[in-house]
Amino acid sequence: MTDMTPRKASSRTAVILGVIALLLAVAGGGYFSIGPERLASLFGAKPEISNVPIGGPFTLTDQNGKPRTQADFAGKFTLIYFGYTYCPDVCPTSLTTMTDALKILGPKADRIVPVFITVDPARDTVDQLKMYVKHFDPRFVGLTGTPEQVVATAKTFRVYFAKQKDAAAGSEDYLVDHTSITYLMDRQGRFLTHFGHAVTAEAMAERIRKYL
């Protein structure tokens, strides 16, 4: 008889949901914002996102040209979004939601560092990031790096991104498909929760407040 204890069943469910999420991200080739909670609701299972490692060490460069690692944010909560400055609507909408949520939190928002990590390092130079993030909350840290550094960082956060296939070779006029999820990390850089693209600033602030 197959041993299907609650722990084993839960772990198996988590693995299945993770595989489904990955397949949807790759096959969809678009903005992927279905999180574990949504997948779990579709299949009648309890989300087990704590079983999936999200986040980890990284080495990037901020909008002032300063090298940054995960250690630089120790002692602060971080609200992290992956996108790119040439994004026509999804990215500015998400960063605006983050900005508005921080305003709603008031003085408590000082415990949080909002972080924007580019998935388009070819165009998102230090100067480009500096010009871009200043339009949002002044606490925003924009991060870029070499293509290898960006890919490695995206992998630690389970972020999918890819230049659209119809982009002309050598052209700088292209779109990048990418995961549209905002991550809340704790003071030690550990994953706490995430927010889909459709979240409102009020809902984001309310959930964040529970961790502060």
Image: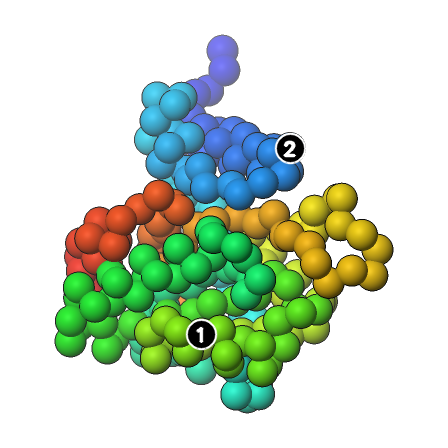
Specify whether 60 is left or right of 52. right
Specify whether 170 is left or right of 4. right
Neighbour tally class for label 2: few under 14, some 14-19, many 20 plus, Cα within 10 Å: few
In the rendered structure, which amino acid carries the disc numbered 1? Val
Q: Position of residue 21 (x, y in %)?
A: 53, 35
Residue drawn at (67%, 69%), measured in percent from left and top? 123
Helix, strand or loop at label 2? It is helix
Q: Where is residue 136 in the image (x, y as percent from the top left)?
A: 37, 71
Residue drawn at (35%, 49%), measured in percent from left and top? 195
For this rendering, which residue is in front, 207 or 163? 163
For this rendering, which residue is in front, 89 or 71? 89
In the rendered structure, which amino acid carries the disc numbered 2? Ala
Q: Name the residue under label 1.
A: 133
Numbered tag placed on residue 27 in the rendering: 2
Quadrant in the rendering for residue 118: bottom right
For this rendering, which residue is in front, 35 or 51? 35
For this rendering, which residue is in front, 208 or 211? 208
User: Considering the image in quadrants, where does the C terminus appear?
Assistant: bottom left
Helix, strand or loop at label 1? It is helix
Specify whether residue 121 is in view.
yes
Where 95 falls versus 111 (above or below)? above
Give the mark nearest the N terminus, 2 or 1.
2
Color theme of the render? rainbow
Residue drawn at (78%, 60%), measured in percent from left and top? 171
Specify whether residue 149 is in view.
no
The mark closer to the camera, 2 or 1, is: 1
